[in-house]
Every structure is written in structure tokens, then in C-alpha cells.
Amino acid sequence: MAEILEVFMVVSFGLAWPTSILKSIRAKTTKGKSLSFLIIILFGYVCGILSKFLSGNINYVVIFYMINFTMVFIDLLIYFRNLKLDKKATEA
């Protein structure tokens, strides 16, 4: 039962990231985004993944952690793209 609840938690968080990624792509700006927030979330997912491996409790939940990590990492990459776009706009 604990694993099922953990899956629900991770999937719930994961449902928000595609929306965030799409918003970042469309906005083409870093306004409204927090670099520190993205880094903290990435750190949290790394800790979740490592806890599974260190405890020897490697199961299907790890896949959801990895999917979420990947989506947040994509959002982080878009953040840096948008940061460059912001700098270009400021220079123009």
C-alpha cells in the first residue's frame, strides 16, 4: 500500500511538469520562474532516486522519479534558453 501511495504522490507531481514546460516554451522569458526552485526540485528527485538504491528497495516507483527528474531538467534547460532570450531583449 505504501508503494501505491508513493506512486500517486510522484505521479501527481509529475502531472504538473508538462504544463510548466509548455508554459516556459510559450512564454520565452524567465519571468515567473525560479531557478532555485527548479534546482531544489531536481535535488529532491535525486534524493528520492538515491534513497531507493541505497535502501535496496528498487521498484517500479523509481521509473516515475526518473521521468519527473527528466521533465524538471528539461524545464531547467528551457529556463536557460529563456534567460538568453531575456538578455537579447534587454540589449535590443
Image: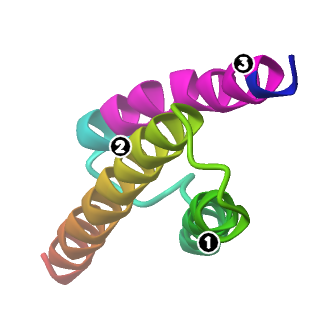
Residue 73 in the magenta stretch? The answer is no
The crowding category of the residue bearing disc 1, from other C-alpha atoms within 10 Å (few below 14, some 14 to 19, many at least 20), is few
Residue tagged 3: 8
Say which of marks 1 and 2 sits in front.
Answer: 1
Please provide the residue range marked out in magenta: 4-23
Up-down relation of residue 20 to residue 76 (above or below): above
**Quadrant of res 40:** bottom right
Report crowding for label 3: few under 14, some 14 to 19, many 20 or more residues within 10 A (C-alpha).
some
Say whether residue 12 is magenta.
yes
Q: CA distance from mark 1 to mark 2?
A: 20 Å
Locate residue 57, reporting x and y percent. 67, 50
Residue under pointer 2: 24
> What is the CA distance from the residue labelled 3 to the residue labelled 1?
20 Å
Q: Secondary structure at mark 2?
A: helix
Task: Quickly name the residue at label 1.
Answer: 43
Q: Decide which of tag 2 and tag 3 comes sooner along the chain.
A: 3
Q: What's under tag 3, amino acid-wise? A: Phe
